[in-house]
Amino acid sequence: MNRNLIFAVCLFCLTFAVSTARAEEPEQEPTLYLELLWMNDSVPREALLIAPPKKVPLVIVRVLSKDEKLESLAAARGTLTQSTENPDDLLLACSEPRTIWGKAGAEKAVPPNFLITSKFLGAVDFGETLAACLVKPVPPEKEEEIVKKYLPPEKK
């Protein structure tokens, strides 16, 4: 009987320690979803930034024709850096762009940098020029709908 009592006390202590440790863990940050919209050579461009906490962000660019039909999709790794001068400003640097669907060469549509200056405004860096960019935060209830827009269309 003494062993059973010792076993029960150890089991209770272990269970209490695990539940206390779980209660102290901070809640994980939600994944950041931002839609970025800009014009390049009079053609609209759209990108989706998916930035999970503590993982490499992903940028997916929709390459549209002049009549705004989807021609290609390109994706790139992203690196998010917070400004030291203004904590609300973010710099998104894109690297390793690749065409993931559609016409070859779509990776050229991925800008090297995005500057996000507020919840709704930003700029796209094309190297020698900057273009204004609309930033649209994606609400949690719209995440699935918006992400589907950035997936290759289903074959008919």
Image (cartoon, rainbow, N blue to C red):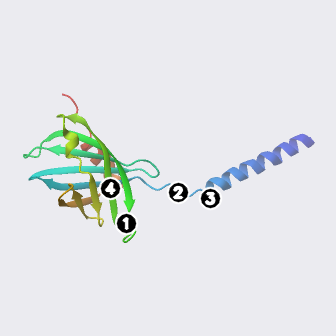
Instruction: Give the residue at x 82% y 48%.
Output: 9
Query: The residue tagged with tag 1: helix, strand or loop?
Result: loop
State which tag comes first along the sequence, 4 or 1.
1
Residue found at the very far right of the displayed protein: 2
Q: Is residue 52 left or right of residue 103?
A: right
State which tag comes first along the sequence, 4 or 2.
2
Query: Which one is in front in this view, the residue at disc 2 or the one at disc 1?
Result: 1
How much space separates mark 3 and mark 4, taking CA atoms? Answer: 32 Å
Let me know if residue 36 appears in the view. yes
**Number of residues whose C-alpha sits closer than 10 Å to that of mark 2, classed few (under 14), some (14–19) or many (20 or more):** few
Q: Which residue is mark 4?
A: 92
State which tag comes first along the sequence, 3 or 1.
3
**Residue 24, numbered circle:** 3
How much space separates mark 3 and mark 2, taking CA atoms? Answer: 9 Å
Q: Which residue is mark 2?
A: 27
How much space separates mark 4 and mark 2, taking CA atoms? Answer: 25 Å
**Number of residues whose C-alpha sits closer than 10 Å to that of mark 1, classed few (under 14), some (14–19) or many (20 or more):** some
Say what amino acid the circle numbered 2 marks: Glu
